[in-house]
Amino acid sequence: MENLQPTVLLDGIIFGEGPRWHRDRLWFSDMWGGQVMSVDLEGNTEHVASFDHPSGLGFMPDGSLLVSVMHERRIYRILQDGIEVHADLTKIAEEMTNDMVVDGKGRAYIDTDLKNVALVEPNGQSRLVAEGMRGPNGLAITPDGKTLIVNETRGEAIRSFSIQSDGSLGPAQIFAELPGTFPDGLCLDSQGAAWIGSPPLDAEHYGDGQFLRVLPGGEITHRITTPGRWAIAPMLGGADRKTLFLTTSSVENVALLKASGKAEKGQIEVVDVEVPGAGLP
């Protein structure tokens, strides 16, 4: 098993979520910081928009950006001339919308309430397409567009679903059982492996985090440990999609956030890998 050593690209954020590579930049939500941002490979940042607890991001076929705003339970669309509500999920999401992936047709899959996956059509209509999961958190679509891969955080596993022609999902299948992990954040590479983040399994004790490269079936080929830091979400990007971006936040930061909502010890880290990213995001 290979253990890679990342370096810091960006610090001074609070809690990075939903990293996405698009137009030569990494786009991400600073969830606790209340803003959507982007950063290039030199660490130059741009402010995109402000929301209360933005989370998952995804790009529509026309290049416009969708943002899942957690407690509002709405998906916003950022256009060149402004921001509009793309979908209102308040009737199907009881508490929150979280991570998101958008397919090549502009259909968005969003995990909700730590138990379901919703589908938002390009016209904004929404419905639940998977229910009763144990903490869906992190989604990706295979390069052929036929399979949705979903972390099951509280189930300590990764699941897969066949995508039907109307966007509905088939029954859940096992991608990998990962006992002792807490899968959070997900991207795929060209060999069919999944990169995931894994914060401490017992969040109350704030242990060390790790990023894992997992093959279908559960073999772990690479591990990136993050001592004293939560491992939140990975994303493969760069010109050849061989730059692995990692959002992390100190365990002290997480404790302060829970106590007061104030801290600035989140980072985006980078490391080069041999196998390029594939699929969506």
Image (tube, rainbow, N blue to C red):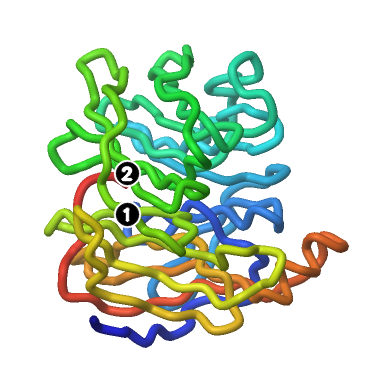
Near-viewer residue (174 or 74)? 174
Q: Is residue 143 left or right of residue 7?
A: left
* Type of the residue with mark 1: Cys
Residue at position x 64%, y 38% from top?
A: 70
Residue, far front: 179
Q: Decide if residue 154 is in sight here.
A: yes
Provide residue 82's location: percent of width, then percent of height: 58, 32
Nearer to us in this view, 103 or 85 = 103
The outermost residue toward the right is 260
Reply above or below: 280 against 270.
above
Residue drawn at (42%, 14%), measured in percent from left and top?
Answer: 123
Report whether 207 appears left or right of 182.
right
Q: Quadrant of the N terminus?
A: bottom left
- As helix, strand or loop, the secondary structure at mark 1 comes to strand
Q: Position of residue 163 (x, y in %)?
A: 24, 25
Note whether 224 is above or below 86 in the view shown.
Answer: below
Q: Position of residue 32 (x, y in %)?
A: 70, 56
- The numbered mark at residue 140 is 2
State left or right for residue 106 relative to residue 44. left
Callout 2: few (<14), some (14-19), or many (20+) C-alpha neighbours within 10 Å? many
Give the residue displayed 32% in from the left and 61% down from the top: 195
Q: CA distance from mark 1 to mark 2?
A: 6 Å
Q: Amino acid at mark 2?
A: Ala
- The residue under label 1 is 187
Secondary structure state at the residue bearing disc 2? strand
Q: Using the rendered image of the protein, determine whether residue 80 is visible from the camera's viewpoint.
A: no
Q: Considering depth in this image, is 105 or 176 the residue closer to the camera?
A: 176
Disc ID at residue 145 = none
How many numbered callouts?
A: 2
Q: Image height check: is 31 above or below 144?
A: below
